[in-house]
Amino acid sequence: MPSYEFVTVDVFTERRFGGNPLAVFLDAEGLSDAAMQALAAEFNLSETTFVLPPENPQHHARVRIFTPRAELPFAGHPNVGTGYVLARRWENPIEHFTFEEGAGLVRVHVLRDADDAPTGARVSAPHSLSMGIGVPTETIAACAGLAPEDVATEMHEPLVASVGMAVSIAEVVDLAALARANPDIAAFRDAAARVPDAPAHFPVLLYARRDGDALRPRVRMFAPLLGVVEDPATGSANAALAALLTALAPGDNLDLAFDIEQGIEMGRPSRLFATARKTGEGPVMATIGGSCVPVMRGWVDM
């Protein structure tokens, strides 16, 4: 009976039991798709990753990402955590990894302290910003258990955005409204069925400005149809948020840095650092990064 080693880390935090937990299977070769999905459901974390040999030997690994219910083409926190875990395992320091994923090639830059020990990672989103359909304010409010007037529309209407995985993004009027949000799973099912061209599982990111500063948002992320009622720290969605806010900011040439809070209402405070760049000639690109801490390790017999 083969055994598969796993480790867990808390991502986007500098202390254990904060941030977003991630399970990483270090050598998943031999596991079937069904076995990976079953293991992700068993761990019941936002995501679990499975590291496989790359198809192209010039790359470092093929990484598959599963929520408790489905496989994802890309996600931020699993890449940050997997890059950190692999950097701790490699004998020789490495500056970055290139992972093969469903959304394409993902570049993961390893963050290190003064002693060259890995402390976290920064991920370059695999795609430039794409902005899709608008989402009715009433739909977002219903999914979040809020009133329509709690949704702010001065800067932008609720809309779908992506830098690798599509998410519906909406601003709310203040931190109090953000704290009141309470996802309604029936409303999510209805939205996924009724909103044309919306992401299949209809994930929703809400944000409010801290002290009125768009560069310092606090966010909450709901994806109950993916088995994640609320996520404590969401890299891909926050990278999309940074890219969106940069695209909407005045000026043709901008490099913006975002200091993002998440997980506060869940008791798992997380801190994410995003950057986004736009030029008059090209697309908006984004990165997302933060610190990680190790928590557990073990083996599963299959």
Image: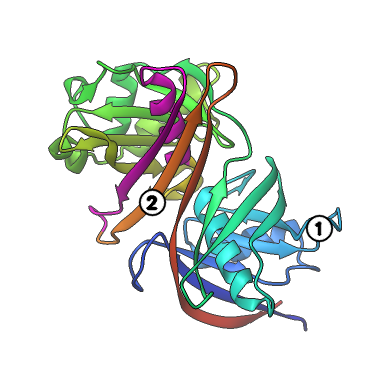
In-front residue for pair 116/273: 116
Numbered disc total: 2
Mark earlier in primary sequence (2, 1): 1
As displayed, is residue 21 above or below residue 297? above
| Dot 1 amino acid type | Pro
Q: Name the residue that disc number 2 marks.
A: 272
**Label for residue 54?**
1
As displayed, is residue 172 above or below residue 108? above
Answer whether residue 278 is visible to the viewer in this image. yes
Q: Is residue 260 magenta?
A: yes
In-front residue for pair 23/259: 259
Q: Is residue 205 magenta?
A: no
- The residue located at (54%, 81%) in the rendering is 297
The stretch of residues the image draws in magenta is 237-266
How far from the left and from the top, in percent, is residue 259?
32, 46
Q: Crowdedness of circle 1 by 10 Å Cα count: few (<14), some, many (20+)? A: some
**Label for residue 102?**
none
Kindly state the secondary structure of the residue where label 1 is placed: loop
As displayed, is residue 197 above or below residue 4? above
Q: Which image quarter: residue 129? A: top right
Q: Crowdedness of circle 2 by 10 Å Cα count: few (<14), some, many (20+)? A: many
| Dot 2 amino acid type | Leu
